[in-house]
Structures are given as structure tokens and as C-alpha cells.
Amino acid sequence: MKINEGFELREMCGEHIIIATGVANIDFSKVISLNESAAYLWREVEGKEFTPETLATLLTAKYDIDDATALADATALAQRWVEAGIAAL
């Protein structure tokens, strides 16, 4: 997986949001808000290839979370990113 080009994580009024940049994303009409852990993952994998397992490893390294829960959460997050069009398999 990889985060699609043309999207940036920004912090506005204490919220982490994904915004579209550039002409190719001019019709992007969604605002995607990320919680603190999702924003952490975004920053860690931005510009890199990653898998749900990569995300799970990052979660277990930073948070007190077991491997199975981390993988389930990471898999769900990765799927939501793909469905939203901000990441690709």
C-alpha cells in the first residue's frame, strides 16, 4: 500500500485532517478527519510502501496494545483509507 499523492495531513483547530492538493484533486469534496493514532500512522508511512502489518507494528511500538487488536485496527484503517481514495493497494 501507499498513500496517494496529492493528499496532506494538516492540523487545524486541534483536529488532524487530510486535504487534497493540486489540480488532480480539485473535485475532492470530502474532509477526512484522523484521530491522534491515525495521524501518527499517516506521518510514519507517508511516502513509503506499507502494509496493515506495518501499521500494526507501529501501533504496538507506540501504544500499549496487543498484536491481535493492533492488526485488526490497522487492517480496518487501511481499508478505510483505500475506500476514501487516499491510499492505494
Image: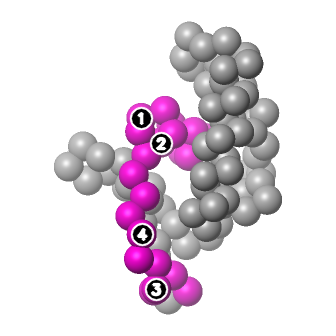
At horizontal 69% and vertical 30% (from top left) the residue drawn is 72
The residue at the point 76 percent across, 46 percent down is 50
Magenta region: 24-44
In the figure, is residue 87 to the left or right of 27? right
Q: Say the numbered circle drawn on residue 30.
A: 4
Residue at the spot x=72%, y=57% of the render? Answer: 2
Spatial distance from mark 1 to mark 3, Cα to Cα? 27 Å
CB-based contact (under 8 Å), mark 1 and mark 3: no
Residue at 26% x, 53% y: name it. 12
How far apart marks 3 and 4 lie (CA) works out to: 9 Å
The quadrant of the rendering that contains the C terminus is bottom right
**Which residue matches tag 2?**
39
Secondary structure beneath label 1: helix
Question: Which residue type does callout 1 highlight?
Answer: Glu
Query: The residue under label 2 is which amino acid type?
Result: Ala
Near-viewer residue (11 or 28): 28
Task: Identify which amino acid the numbered label 3 is placed on.
Answer: Asp
Q: Would you identify the image quadrant in which residue 77 lies?
A: top right
Using the image, determine if residue 22 lies above or below residue 47: below
Residue contact between numbered discs 1 and 2, judged by CB atoms under 8 Å = yes
